[in-house]
């Protein structure tokens, strides 16, 4: 009986260990059962959550509204957010910050900084010489960068989500405009870190909208490609996106629906805000004309009066979208003088005539980037609040040549719902139906470097080389490896944006610097001295463009190889014990597939090794390779020919008749990797 107990004791111990591990996992997940998404617009934001029993729900704010103004009021000892801050805009316009996302990642000389000053002259912007960016100077003792203001708002959005979910929330998916570059995306991530949020992904708002549309129409997606155009005109900008829906065969889940971003066009400043500013200027001119001859001050010099006019212009734009005319009226606009004026829709359209002419621009850009024609687009769907303006719909309908525009999607909440679905898919606490998302790179990225080349006359000269890492409209997330074959000493290379010829001159100025970073490698020469008997396989730089569209250089390493005799050793007791424990808990030698789908690496070689007479290395050769451990580079033995198989007896006779050769030790390829600092 005692022997039986001893045999069961290891099993009991294993069961207790397994139960402990599972309980620890459940406790770890209990704090993160709910996830949230923040659809961060220029004028307002929408917050959505997913928690057990509450699938994909829009969060109501403290005023029981589904939409919260992106407004922050900062005083010495008080802070107001959302509707409370919006009501403070008239009382204290200098301390009330709006549309500050337009300043994210912008340097002082950026045209958008000058545009922001012209639109909101009540705000004092300072210059940070260390970061080369601007900040808000609220008072001599109070100053905040746009990232800090955004972090406060993200923290407020989390508090709304936690109150609604009745539990703490840390994981979030945040939407950003598709045209955000690397600096702007990193600014949003920095703000999220300051707010204590764990960002599962920065998802483009056009991609989130397309995902929401596809999720609720999963049954309509089949193997036949469907091309849908989404035209999104919000408050601050306009984005046109061409999306292809179809079912594809996946590695793990079989046939699943997929959306692929095929083309994107945008206008950074075309939106409802610019229309409201035109109306505000018109109302200010009418008010000044009414007080002409009274030696009154210009209403434009009064920040409070201009804040009142902007609020009335917002209301007027909404009303004129459904009515031919409307009377704008404000009590006590300035110096206790009331204002009242009639504005017609025709006057509004005349004020914004040049804006309406820019409506077809993003459509043409999207078609060019997708290399498609309008005949291939099955439907054009409207997204965003500014698309409710009748003139916008009229001009767009004429530009796309369709019978009607699609309005079968919630123009305000589609991006928030798509983002929260992605948050649930990325979270470990939920299991959702797979929906493959293939986003596209808007701005190409390349690597530039200079090296010495020897000409026929023996003269050495410098040659500038460019290698495209991520091409325009290429899919991401994606990993790339570029190999430098002609360096044996420390060197530098530059990571820059590629050809931005599709941007206009003004957009290029807004875009900012085209240089992302310069990488200076150290220790290259030392690694070659350390392994003089090994053959160099080049210096490999590993790049990653993650799910958020943020580029990172994971590592740079030099690879050396040599042939050595294999001397297999018997497994040690600790190795056997480790393998036994791994098998007990379901472990294995096969690596799990990556969750983000980047299980392939594109490797690009810089060119032939140094000393080669040919120069074909200037044309980069791309190839896709499955990621494999660097140590296992030996090739498998060739398969046997499938011919007429000899009987077993004849095979045995052949073997016995041959002279037995001397046993040879197997030869394997040994690989050493030396990593560099940069």
Image (tube, rainbow, N blue to C red):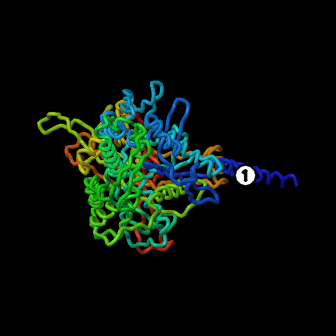
Residue ID at (36%, 31%): 132
The residue at the point 47 percent across, 69 percent down is 217
Of residues 228 and 22, the one nearer the viewer is 228
User: Where in the figure is residue 427, as x and y percent of width and height?
Assistant: 56, 53
The quarter of the picture where the C terminus appears is top left
Query: In this rendering, would 61 be left or right of 232?
Result: right
Q: Residue 65: percent from the left, percent from the top?
A: 54, 53
Query: From where the camera sits, is residue 611 visible?
Result: yes
Quarter holding the N terminus is: bottom right
> SS at mark 1?
helix
Residue 412 relative to residue 514: left or right: right
User: What is the tally of numbered marks visible in this picture?
Assistant: 1
Q: Where is residue 587 in the image (x, y as percent from the top left)?
A: 61, 53
Q: Mark 1 points at which residue?
A: 19
For residue 183, say whether it is visible: no
Q: Find residue 30 and report its horizontal and vertical position in percent.
A: 66, 50
Counting other residues with Cα less than 10 Å from the Cα at mark 1, is it few (<14), some (14-19), or many (20 or more)? few
Above-or-below relation of 475 to 613: below
Which residue does the image show at 64% across and 60% down from the upper left?
53
Farthest residue in the top direction? 140
The answer to which of 51 and 78 lies nearer the viewer is 78
Residue 610 located left or right of residue 340: left
Is 330 located above or below residue 256 in the figure? above
Task: Answer above or below: position of 588 versus 295.
Answer: below
Residue at the extreme right:
1
**Extreme residue in the front direction:** 294
């Amino acid at each position: 009986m005692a022997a039986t107990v001893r045999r069961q004791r290891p099993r009991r111990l294993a069961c207790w260990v397994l139960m402990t591990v599972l309980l620890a996992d459940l406790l770890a997940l209990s704090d993160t059962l709910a996830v949230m998404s923040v659809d961060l617009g220029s004028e307002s934001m929408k917050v959505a959550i997913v928690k057990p029993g509450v699938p994909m729900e829009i969060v109501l704010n403290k005023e029981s509204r589904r939409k919260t103004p992106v407004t922050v009021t900062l005083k010495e000892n008080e802070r107001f957010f959302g509707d409370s801050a919006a009501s403070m805009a008239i009382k204290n316009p200098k301390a009330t910050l709006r549309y500050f996302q337009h300043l994210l990642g912008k340097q002082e000389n950026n045209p958008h900084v000058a545009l922001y000053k012209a639109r909101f002259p009540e705000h004092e912007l300072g210059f940070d010489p260390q970061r080369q960016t601007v900040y808000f100077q609220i008072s001599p003792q109070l100053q905040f960068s746009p990232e800090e203001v955004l972090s406060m708002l993200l923290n407020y959005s989390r508090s709304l989500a936690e109150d609604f979910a009745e539990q703490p929330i840390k994981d979030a998916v945040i939407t950003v405009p598709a045209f955000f570059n690397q600096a702007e995306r990193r600014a949003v991530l920095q703000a999220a870190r300051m707010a204590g949020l764990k960002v599962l992904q920065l998802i483009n708002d056009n991609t989130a909208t397309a995902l929401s549309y596809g999720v609720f129409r999963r049954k309509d997606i089949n193997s036949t490609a469907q091309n849908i155009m989404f035209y999104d005109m919000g408050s601050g900008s306009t984005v046109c996106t061409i999306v292809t829906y179809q079912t594809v065969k996946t590695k793990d889940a079989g046939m699943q629906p997929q959306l692929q971003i095929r083309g994107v066009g945008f206008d950074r400043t075309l939106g409802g805000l610019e229309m409201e500013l035109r109306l505000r200027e018109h109302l200010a001119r009418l008010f000044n004309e009414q007080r002409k001859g009274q030696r009154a001050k210009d209403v434009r010099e009064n920040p409070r009066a201009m804040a009142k006019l902007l609020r009335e212009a917002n209301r007027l734009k909404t009303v004129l979208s459904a009515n031919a005319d409307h009377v704008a009226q404000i009590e006590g606009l300035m110096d206790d003088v009331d204002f009242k004026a009639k504005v017609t829709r025709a006057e509004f359209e005349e004020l914004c005539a040049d804006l309406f002419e820019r409506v077809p621009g993003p459509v043409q850009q999207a078609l060019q980037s997708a290399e498609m024609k309008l005949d291939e687009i099955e439907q054009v769907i409207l997204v965003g609040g500014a698309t409710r303006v009748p003139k916008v719909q009229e001009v767009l309908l004429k530009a796309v040549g369709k019978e009607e525009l699609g309005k079968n999607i919630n123009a305000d909440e589609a991006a928030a719902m798509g983002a929260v679905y992605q948050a649930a898919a990325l979270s470990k606490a939920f299991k959702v139906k797979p929906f493959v998302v293939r986003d596209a790179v808007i701005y190409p990225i390349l690597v530039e470097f200079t090296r010495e080349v020897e000409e026929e006359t023996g003269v050495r000269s410098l040659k500038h080389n460019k290698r495209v890492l991520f091409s325009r409209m290429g899919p991401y997330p994606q990993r790339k490896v570029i190999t430098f074959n002609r360096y044996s000493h420390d060197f530098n290379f530059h990571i820059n944006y590629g050809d931005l010829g599709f941007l206009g001159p003004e957009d290029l100025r807004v875009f900012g610097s085209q240089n992302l970073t310069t990488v200076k490698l150290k220790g290259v020469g030392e690694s070659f001295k350390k392994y003089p008997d090994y053959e160099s396989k080049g210096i490999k730089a590993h790049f990653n463009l993650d799910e958020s569209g943020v580029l990172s250089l994971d590592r740079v390493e030099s690879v050396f190889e040599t042939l050595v005799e294999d001397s297999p050793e018997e497994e040690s007791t600790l190795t056997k014990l480790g393998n036994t424990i791994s098998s007990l808990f379901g472990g294995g030698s096969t690596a799990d597939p990556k969750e983000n789908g980047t299980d392939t690496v594109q490797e690009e070689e810089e060119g032939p090794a140094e000393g080669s007479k040919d120069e074909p290395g200037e044309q980069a050769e791309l190839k896709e390779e499955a990621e494999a451990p660097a140590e296992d580079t030996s090739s498998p033995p060739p398969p046997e020919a499938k011919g007429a198989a000899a009987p077993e007896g004849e095979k045995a006779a052949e073997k016995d008749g041959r002279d037995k050769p001397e046993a040879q030790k197997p030869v394997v390829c040994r690989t050493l990797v030396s990593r560099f600092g940069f």
